[in-house]
Amino acid sequence: MPALPHLTTAAAEETVRSRLDKLRDARVVVTGGGGLVGSRLVALLRSAGCAVTVLDRMDAYPESGHETFGVARSGARLVVGDIRDADTVGTLLREADFVVHAAAYADVAACTRRPDIAFRANVEGTQVVLEQAARFPVRRLVLVSSASVYGNGVPGVEGPQVFREDMPLDPVSVYANGKLWAEHQTRLMLGAASGTEYAVVRYFSVYGEPQIPKPGSHSWMVPWLSLQARLGRPMRLNGGGNQVRDLVHVDDIAEATALALTEEQMAGQTVNVGTGRPTSVREVADLIAPYFPGSRRIVTPRPDGDPLGGYACVERSRELLRWQARIGVREGVDRYVRWLLETPEAMPRWLAEESGNPEEA
Ligand SMILES: NC(=O)c1ccc[n+]([C@@H]2O[C@H](COP(=O)([O-])OP(=O)(O)OC[C@H]3O[C@@H](n4cnc5c(N)ncnc54)[C@H](O)[C@@H]3O)[C@@H](O)[C@H]2O)c1
């Protein structure tokens, strides 16, 4: 794959920090700000001088997941509540300058198992946030969407595909369908006429310390494979591990999302947030294995709704967001595994107490 040219414009020379100066003293509401991405974004916004309010149910993880993410220590105001509660959302938005809507039932497998919960959180909840953003206009709402809206990309194409923002979308999971609906509804309800600008960011596969997977999930391969190896269990390669993902570090995700609030050209636009590079599940296992001598692998069936995957076309995010990812997968995996080794208390009890995999090959 050809190396991506680095941004050479004056924009790239300005640091992200100085560009975020525009947000100093801004009042920002982050729905889902207690989750993995949200809490990293909140920390960044706080360091940029924003007054941040988080609205989150704080129940997406068992044990101390949310505590590990640290939003309670970030200096943000934490409102524990549901985005479907219109009064609460309205009260918060009435006093806000910007909104990032990141709250979601954010797991592909869980949404497949419980489409009812997925609908309530990802569709109904988003509707409430959009209604309140139209009623109490803010300067801009950033909707967090997902590369899952591309589904398997163009039918019949062999090998990893590049996903461009303007290609036909064909979600293959309940989760992805909700994200696509949310994108369309945002475009239909917000924009100039409503008084609230919007921007849509499509994240590719987010990873990075202190990410811990949810029980029953098959997403988030960096923590899954690392935790299995750490427990001395074989790393499970679903469907042979040939699926590819564009792995984008949570620090990069936080920067891109914060910039989507301020970049003028992002008004009314949708951009991919990825690295522009595909990595297969197998390649991730190869990067993790040296940290766990003697680690083994096992091939397991590919779960329903698990797309073959692709990687981001990053032209638009470079042009409109004036951003590109900075953390490569080798560095990101190294950071993750080192954190895991240094933080034994991060190992979830529910996972450690599982019986492991009896069908090792
Ligand atoms: N992690 C990824 O790889 C990835 C990829 C693409 C898109 N995304 C999107 O990024 C966003 C953040 O995801 P994440 O990975 O940090 O997941 P997460 O589960 O860690 O964070 C989501 C947060 O939303 C909260 N939430 C869920 N339903 C809610 C409700 N009804 N009311 C209030 N709060 C609610 C949860 O408690 C959780 O803290 C989500 O919109 C997700 O769909 C994530």
Image (cartoon, helix red, strand yellow):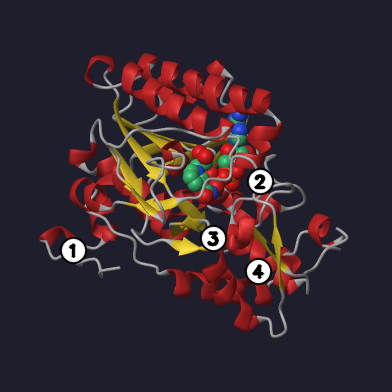
Q: Earlier in the sequence, mark 2 or mark 3?
A: 3
Residue type at numbered disc 2: Pro
Measure the alpha-carbon separation of dots 1 and 3: 31 Å
Give yes or no for contact between labels 2 and 1 (Cβ–Cβ under 8 Å): no
Q: Which mark is residue 226?
A: 4
Q: Which residue is mark 2?
A: 303
Q: CA distance from mark 2 to mark 3?
A: 13 Å
Looking at the image, which is closer to me, 194 or 205?
205
Tell me the CA gap for discs 2 and 1.
38 Å
Residue that label 1 marks: 7
Q: Quadrant of the C terminus?
A: bottom right
Whether residue 24 is visible here, answered yes or no, is: no
Q: What residue is shown at x 60% (from left), y 73% (from top)?
A: 337
First reached walking from the N terminus: tag 2 or tag 1: 1
Is the C-beta separation of discs 1 and 4 under 8 Å? Answer: no
Q: Are marks 4 and 3 in contact (CB under 8 Å)?
A: no
Q: State the CA–CA distance, disc 4 to disc 3.
A: 17 Å
Closer to viewer: mark 4 or mark 3 = 3
- Residue 232 image point, x, y percent: 78, 74
Q: List x then y, in percent, for residue 329.
A: 45, 69
Q: Secondary structure at mark 4?
A: helix
- The span from disc 1 to disc 4 (Cα, nearest Å) is 33 Å
Element assignment for label 2: loop
